[in-house]
Image (cartoon, grey):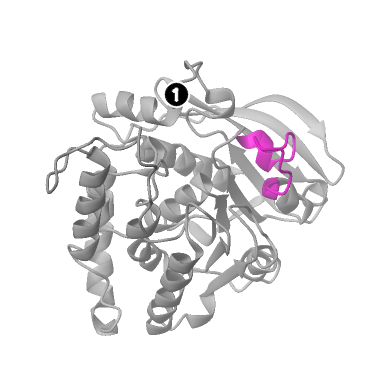
Amino acid sequence: MTFDFPESGILAVSPAGRNFSPWRWFERQLAAAAAHPVDPCPVDAPEQLVAWRRRARRRLRSLLGPLPAPVPLRVEIRSSQDCGSYRRDLIVFDSEEHMSVPAYLLVPHARNRPGAGPGPAILAQHGHGPGKDEVCGVVPGEDGTTGNDYAHQLAERGYVVLAPDLRTFGERADWNPPNLYACDLSHVHATLLGYRLLTLDLWDLARGLDLLAAHPLVDRRRMGVVGLSQGGTCALFLAAWDRRVKATVVSGYLNRWSACASIPWNMCGSQTLPGIVSTLDHFELGALVAPRPLLVETGSEDNIFPAAAAIEVSEQLGHVYGAMGAAGRVQLDAFEGGHRWHGEQAYPFLARWLGPGGEGGSD
């Protein structure tokens, strides 16, 4: 996909046949890198999938770069509120030295009844906006929308839910001048220290899985992750990296780099890894999630992660899942609407794979 800029004020002017524009340079480099992947997933040679997945996992681990050293979680409950069918605890846990993670932990009252036993849990990740408060239904989104409260919806359906703030969002947002984008500034700071911001976010979420796995009401074999937009980024990457994730819902994100990154001002420092365009496209990340259950949501009017690319990639993933004997584990919800959470298929999908009597999702 390309984008037509206004005639003035956007692109650097250059003589005919020469390029001064960093954006046009990126567009051309993006197209070239996307057209020549390093080691594409062998969709038409299923006998090669096992070896390819082994190589692809090594590449993903290399792209993530250095990881922080783990520290004890030291979970602290800061406050609690009865929300009707569940209790919402405002908690904090440590993910690494010098960094703690504020989060909501939603625990359905029914799960605390005698004899209930351990059950499913969901890591519900927010996108750009207010942070954990939006997905828990505490506040609306930045544009006043109220339909992205999927953490609240999941708790009402009986899941233990952890909803953390990502770095630069919610309680983890530093003050910035209005002309500085927090994701990009934090990406610069992480890069100066040899880290990637996306990796640091994924590390925090992996520690969140540690927290859920240690909870007495959680069955660690039935943990899933869901997220919209940047939350979808985290859901896809986390499921590809951490096989404790047994079911995944990626909303408003799964795409192709050549489609979503070619939209100006779409990418930010919290969603990138060096050299990933030619190394692991969204399709390859999805192939690393396989054969664990994966549901993709895409809105017909999504103007930053185009539906056509999401549908095409989902169909390709169907071939990979089919080759692995798991054709029924990948699902597409292509709905009428924009860049938002839908949920119509997501809730029954999660109930099928994680809920009571669920079919499970091993790798």
Q: Is residue 209 visible?
A: yes
Asked if the stretch drawn in magenta spans residue 47, the answer is no
Q: Who's the residue at 47% across and 80% down the image? A: 326
Asked if the stretch drawn in magenta spans residue 136, the answer is yes
**Is 133 placed left or right of 26 in the picture?**
right
List the residue tagged with mark 1: 99
Hey, which residue is sitting farthest right in the picture?
A: 84
Quarter of the figure with residue 256? bottom left
**Is 356 placed left or right of 194 in the picture?**
right
In this view, the residue in front, 112 or 131, is 131
Secondary structure mostly seen in magenta is loop
Q: Is residue 75 visible?
A: no
Quarter of the figure with residue 46? bottom left
Quadrant where the C terminus is found in the figure: bottom left
* Residue 304: % across, % down: 48, 51
**Is 22 placed left or right of 244 in the picture?**
left
Quadrant where the N terminus is found in the figure: bottom left
Disc 1 marks a residue whose amino acid type is Met
Q: Who's the residue at 33% across and 31% down the image? A: 69
* Residue 63: % across, % down: 25, 47
Q: Who's the residue at 72% across and 56% down the image? A: 117
Tag 1's secondary structure? strand
In this view, the residue in front, 211 or 303, is 303
In this view, the residue in front, 204 or 190, is 190
Crowdedness of circle 1 by 10 Å Cα count: few (<14), some, many (20+)? few
* Residue 88: % across, % down: 75, 36
In the rendered image, the vertical position of residue 61 relative to residue 105, given as above or below: below
Q: Which stretch is magenta?
A: 131-151
In the rendered image, the vertical position of residue 102 relative to residue 128, given as above or below: above
Q: Who's the residue at 51% across and 34% down the image? A: 166
